[in-house]
C-alpha cells in the first residue's frame, strides 16, 4: 500500500513497478527481520555435505521413536520454525520462504528479487542445506528434543 | 562398463534430489537420479526425508507472509 499511495508521482510505469517491487520486498524483509541474527560463517564444503537425514540416523536423538525423522520435524512448533528461519542469512531465507512456503516458482522469485535465475537456484540449494543444519543446531541448543514428545 | 559403474555417486544424487522432486532436472539427469535411487536404499531415505521437509515447510508457510503482502507479490509477478 505504501507503494500505491505515491504511484501517481512517477512518470515511468516501468520505473514505478521496479520501485514498488523494491518496497514490497523490503516490506516482506521487514516482516522477517524481526529477531534475526547473524549466522556464524560455515565453510561452504561443510554446508554442502551436511545431511540432516544422515545426521539424525547417526545421532539418533529420539531413541524411543519408531519414525525418527518425521518425529524430529514434528517436534518443531510454529515459533520454532520461525526462529530457525530467522537464523538464516536473508539472501538464503527469502528464496526459501518464497519457493517452499509460499509456492512461487523459481522464475517468479528471480523476478521478485531482481536476481538471475542461476543465482536463485544456487541460493535455494545453499538455503536448504543451511535450513537443515539450523534445524539440527536449534534442536540441540534448545530443549526441543526433550519437550518435543509433549507437543 | 557395468550398470553400477555408470551410476552417479550418492553425493551427486543427493545434491539433485530437491530439483528431482521439483521436476527441474533435464531428462538425462532425471534418469540418472532414478537409476541411482533404484539401487541405493540410503538415498531413497534421503528422498523421502526431502519430501517430508518440503511438506514441513509448506505447512508452516501460511504465517510467514501476511496475506495482503502475498497478494501484492502475486500481483507484482503478473505485472513484471
Image (cartoon, grey):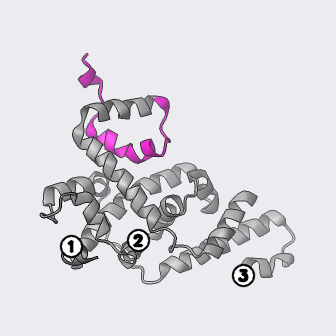
Residue at (25, 54) in percent of width and height? A53
Query: Can residue A45 be seen in this snapshot?
Result: yes
Callout 1 secondary element: helix
Q: Which image quarter: residue A141?
A: bottom left
Q: Where is mark 3, residue-wise?
A: A2
Residue at the image position 72 percent from the left and 71 percent from the top: A19
| Residue in the picture at 16% in, 65% down | A62
Q: Chain of mark 2?
A: A
Q: Name the residue beneath numbered marker 1.
A: A145
Q: Are marks 2 and 3 in contact (CB under 8 Å)?
A: no
Q: Please state, as top left, top right, bottom left or bottom right, where the C terminus of chain B lies in the image.
A: bottom right
Disc 1 to disc 3, how far (Cα)? 43 Å
Against A120, residue A133 (above or below) is below
- Describe the element under mark 3 as helix, strand or loop: helix
The reply to whether dot 1 and dot 3 touch (C-beta < 8 Å) is no
Residue A26 lies, in percent from the top left, at 60, 75
Q: Residues within 10 Å of mark 1 (few under 14, many from 20)?
A: some
Residue A85: mark in rendering: 2
Q: Residue at x 32, y 61 (%)?
A: A132
Amino acid at each position: 500500500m505504501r507503494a500505491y499511495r505515491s504511484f501517481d508521482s512517477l512518470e515511468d510505469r516501468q520505473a514505478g513497478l521496479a520501485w514498488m517491487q523494491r518496497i514490497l520486498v523490503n516490506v516482506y524483509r521487514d516482516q522477517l527481520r524481526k529477531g534475526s541474527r547473524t549466522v556464524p560463517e560455515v565453510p561452504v564444503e561443510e554446508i554442502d555435505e551436511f545431511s540432516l537425514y544422515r545426521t539424525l540416523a547417526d545421532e539418533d536423538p529420539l531413541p524411543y521413536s519408531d519414525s525418527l525423522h518425521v518425529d524430529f520435524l514434528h517436534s518443531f512448533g510454529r515459533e520454532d520454525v520461525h526462529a530457525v528461519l530467522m537464523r538464516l542469512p536473508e539472501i538464503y531465507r527469502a528464496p526459501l520462504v518464497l519457493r517452499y512456503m509460499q509456492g512461487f516458482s523459481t522464475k517468479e522469485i528471480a523476478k521478485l528479487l531482481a536476481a538471475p535465475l542461476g543465482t536463485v537456484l544456487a541460493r535455494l540449494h545453499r538455503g536448504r542445506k543451511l535450513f537443515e543444519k539450523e534445524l539440527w543446531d536449534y534442536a540441540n541448543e534448545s530443549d526441543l528434543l526433550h519437550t518435543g514428545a509433549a507437543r | 562398463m557395468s550398470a553400477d559403474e555408470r551410476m552417479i555417486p550418492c553425493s551427486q544424487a543427493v545434491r539433485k534430489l530437491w530439483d528431482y522432486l521439483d521436476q527441474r532436472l533435464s531428462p538425462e539427469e532425471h534418469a540418472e537420479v532414478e537409476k541411482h535411487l533404484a539401487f541405493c536404499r540410503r538415498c531413497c531415505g534421503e528422498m523421502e526425508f526431502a519430501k517430508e521437509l518440503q511438506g514441513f515447510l509448506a505447512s508452516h508457510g501460511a504465517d510467514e507472509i501476511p496475506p495482503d503482502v502475498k497478494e501484492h507479490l502475486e500481483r507484482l509477478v503478473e505485472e513484471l
